[in-house]
Image: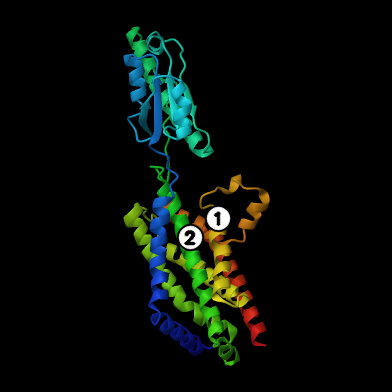
């Protein structure tokens, strides 16, 4: 293998990229555009739930209970209902997601320490949102009920009563439970794999369409040298794009990197090598840029979005689907990325993910070399 021939091919590719500002702009600006679009559009945080209230008690106690829902960003009071007939209409029209009904006698029961009930009717058309809303209602009610119970004991002259369980949860790595800290690493994986695979896939197919691929195959250049020379420029561009995405994530979404930048760079380098080799393999199977683009989208967008753990956890997937995810590089890079960015883990802690990415890169690069050698014969 000749370093001079590799450098010549890489320099030729760089010149071709520099002569096509649209391609260079696409490789650098489109990832940032996708980050902004996906980052602001996708959120797992459920807040400002539209709330409708029917207060049949109309006492100071019932109003205090209703006000407890409005002291956070989780609920927004949209409608004060006059009768139960309004509930179905508001839920059907989407003007309310939760309808809260406070019964008559609620205030007197609470003041006397008697057990009382609250009815919460939730729109279940979106199961995840409905379950979250029910959890919020239960949490707010439990907190208010506990404080009301303590006040009733104090009025009865009983003091010093304390709960037997002092529950103090502590959330590690993402104390604020911000969905951006969870989603942005997945967006980085999605954007990098799409741009890396598509860039090399369409680049080599472009050589076929122009008729220059045959000249390269009959030249002294070996298939492995051609692959390395073609991918090095896009590897450099991919690293620049990765740095830009991480910087934009910090500025736009406040996602910081708790681990080492060096460890993150090394893992990203291994991941990009595998993605670029996959793009080369796709190019050997395609005869036009349109076909290469379509295959690249099918092998990157949907698998990363669905099967990498980006949004949907693996434990909820059927066994056969979990088995398929083991061959996807995005799964391992996302796991390593979250460990380094959120947990501050080191390179050694991600050794299994890095090993899987190296194996993937070797397999795709080997398949590309075999395919190019067959075309050269």
Residue 164 is left or right of residue 351, and the answer is left
Secondary structure found at label 2: helix
**Camera-side residue of 372 and 171:** 372
- The percent position of residue 355, horizontal first and vertical second, equals 57, 64
Q: CA distance from mark 1 to mark 2?
A: 9 Å
Q: Which mark is residue 308?
A: 1
Q: Which mark is residue 189?
A: 2
- The percent position of residue 154, horizontal first and vertical second, equals 33, 11
The residue lying at 34 percent from left, 33 percent from top is 72
Q: Is residue 164 above or below residue 152?
A: below
Q: Is residue 24 above or below residue 143?
A: below
- The percent position of residue 13, horizontal first and vertical second, equals 46, 83
Q: Is residue 92 above or below residue 292?
A: above
Residue 226 is left or right of residue 148, and the answer is right
Secondary structure found at label 1: loop
Residue 349 visible in image:
no
Say which quadrant the N terminus sits in: bottom right
Residue 122 visible in image:
yes
Pointer 1 with pointer 2, Cβ within 8 A:
yes
Indicate which disc, 1 or 2, sits on the residue closer to the N terminus.
Answer: 2
- The percent position of residue 169, horizontal first and vertical second, equals 43, 34
Residue 151 occupies quadrant = top left
Q: How is the image coloured?
A: rainbow
Q: Which class describes the residues within 10 Å of circle 1: few (<14), some (14-19), or many (20+)?
A: many
């Amino acid at each position: 293998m000749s370093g001079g021939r590799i450098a010549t091919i890489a320099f030729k590719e760089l010149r071709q990229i520099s002569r096509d500002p649209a391609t260079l702009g696409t490789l650098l600006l489109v990832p940032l555009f996708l980050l902004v679009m996906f980052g602001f559009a996708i959120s797992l945080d459920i807040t400002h739930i539209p709330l409708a209230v029917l207060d049949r008690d109309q006492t100071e106690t019932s109003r205090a209970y209703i006000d407890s829902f409005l002291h956070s960003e989780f609920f927004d009071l949209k409608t004060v209902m006059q009768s139960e007939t309004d509930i179905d209409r508001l839920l059907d029209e989407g003007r309310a997601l939760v309808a809260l009904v406070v019964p008559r006698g609620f205030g007197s029961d609470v003041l006397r320490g008697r057990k009382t009930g609250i009815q919460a009717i939730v729109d279940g058309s979106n199961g995840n949102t409905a379950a979250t809303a029910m959890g919020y209602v239960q949490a707010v009610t439990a907190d208010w009920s506990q404080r009301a119970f303590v006040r009733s004991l104090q009025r009865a002259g009983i003091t010093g009563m304390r709960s037997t369980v002092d529950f103090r949860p502590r959330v590690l790595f993402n104390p604020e439970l911000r969905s951006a800290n969870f989603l942005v690493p997945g967006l980085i994986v999605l954007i990098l794999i799409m741009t890396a695979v598509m860039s090399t896939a369409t680049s080599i197919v472009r050589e076929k369409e122009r008729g220059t691929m045959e000249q390269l195959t009959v030249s002294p250049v070996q298939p492995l040298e051609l692959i390395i020379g073609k991918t090095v420029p896009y590897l450099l561009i991919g690293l620049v794009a990765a740095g830009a995405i991480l910087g934009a994530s910090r500025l736009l979404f406040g996602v910081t990197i708790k681990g080492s930048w060096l460890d993150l760079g090394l893992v990203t380098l291994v991941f990009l090598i595998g993605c670029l080799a996959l793009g080369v393999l796709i190019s050997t199977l395609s005869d036009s840029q349109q076909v290469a683009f379509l295959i690249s989208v099918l092998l990157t967008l949907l698998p990363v979005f669905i099967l990498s753990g980006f949004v949907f956890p693996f434990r909820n997937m059927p066994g056969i689907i979990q088995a398929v995810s083991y061959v996807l590089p995005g799964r391992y890079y996302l796991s390593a990325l979250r460990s380094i960015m959120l947990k501050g883990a080191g390179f050694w802690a991600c050794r299994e993910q890095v090993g899987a990415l190296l194996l993937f890169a070797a397999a795709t690069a080997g398949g590309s070399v075999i395919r190019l050698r067959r075309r050269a014969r």
